[in-house]
Amino acid sequence: MTRENFGTQRLAIGQVARLAGVSTRTIRHYHQVGLLPEAERDSGGRRVYRLPDIARLLWIRKLAELGLTLPEIGDAIAGAHEQEEILGELERTLSRQEEKIRAQREAVRRLREAGSSPGLIGASASEEVRALLAEVGGVRISGEGLELALLLEKVVGADKAALDAVTQSLVQNDERLATWGDRLVRLYDDLADAEPDDPRVEEYAREQAAYCNAVKEAELARGIDIDALLEKLPSESADDEIDEETFGLHMEALMSGHRPSPAQRKAMGRFFDLVDPQ
């Protein structure tokens, strides 16, 4: 092949693959995802490539070596035919990558500053909620508690999960509330084998309602009005909503396979009646 006729020479896919240092499978994938336009076909129906096709393939490989993903490469070379155009698009793509990396570094910094696992929750919460979580000093969660916190964030969103962490922090730092909460957990567990008409059902419901009121009073004493903050949170967009089946799966995971007994269901129902008589 001479220099003069190289521009008009048609090469088979195997030859182009060897020239570019890639596999024929990779070239076919580039066709499939739209990075390479569909090649000409010879009389036997096989793909054949000319110089512009090979040059585009080499550009794709060069950009891939720089660390760009295939979608980013597509953005960089879309509509750009001259070297300067492609380099300009590449520079803009790299700038977007830098912005993304800066945002990721900022998230890591917030996690380090939080010094606790709710930082993992609060990192994606709004600035106001993050500031509130930092003000109360964070809360230590590990093991199953952290797993449940991450699932809770998925179900209710980062802000609401972070506000729940604020409440947990206040409870953990208040010996009376912490002891009270532990006792309620034991009382609820005891209802697993109880009958629905067991007097402990009403006892639990009233104790839980009183406990929630005490927690709210502790929040207000610190100048924290969770209800007011919840009202200020933006409503979920359609993109943020999850379908009923997915919501059910998340709730199933949150319950860790637990199925409330009839007595436990009645106790919780009675509790909700007490805190929300409507």
Image (cartoon, rainbow, N blue to C red):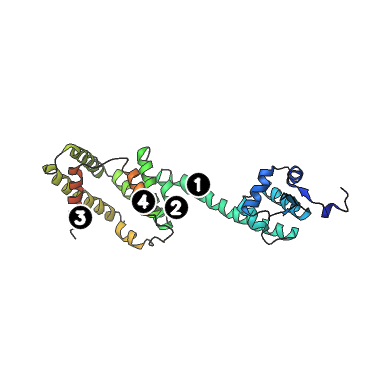
Residue at point 20%, 46% (across, down): 265
Check disc 4 and report its element: helix, strand or loop: helix
Q: Position of residue 253 (x, y in %)?
A: 35, 43
Classify 26 as above or below 277: above
Q: Distance between the residues labelled 3 and 2?
A: 31 Å
Q: Residues within 10 Å of mark 1 (few under 14, many from 20)?
A: some
- At label 1, which amino acid type do we have? Val
Q: Disc 4 to disc 3, how far (Cα)? A: 28 Å
Pinpoint residue 130: horizontal percent, then vertical percent. 41, 53
Residue 67 at least partly seen: no
Where in the figure is residue 143, as x and y percent of width and height? 37, 37
Give the residue type at disc 4. Answer: Glu
Amino acid type for the residue under numbered disc 3 = Val
Q: Nearer the viewer, mark 4 or mark 2?
A: 4
Q: What element carries label 3?
A: helix
SS state under label 1? helix
Mark 4 or mark 1: which comes first in sequence? 1
Indicate which disc, 4 or 2, sits on the residue closer to the N terminus: 2
Is residue 19 visible in this depiction of the protein? yes
Residue position for label 4: 245
Number of the front mark, 4 or 3:
4
* Sequence order check, earlier mark of 3 and 1: 1
The earlier-in-sequence mark between 2 and 1 is 1
Q: Nearer the viewer, residue 248 or 256?
A: 248
- First in residue order: circle 3 vs circle 2: 2
Give the class, few, some or many, for how many residues have Cα within 10 Å of label 4's Cα (few <14, many ≥20). few
Residue 180 is left or right of residue 52, and the answer is left
The residue wearing badge 2 is: 124
Q: Which of 107 and 49 is in front in this view?
A: 49
Residue corresponding to mark 1: 108
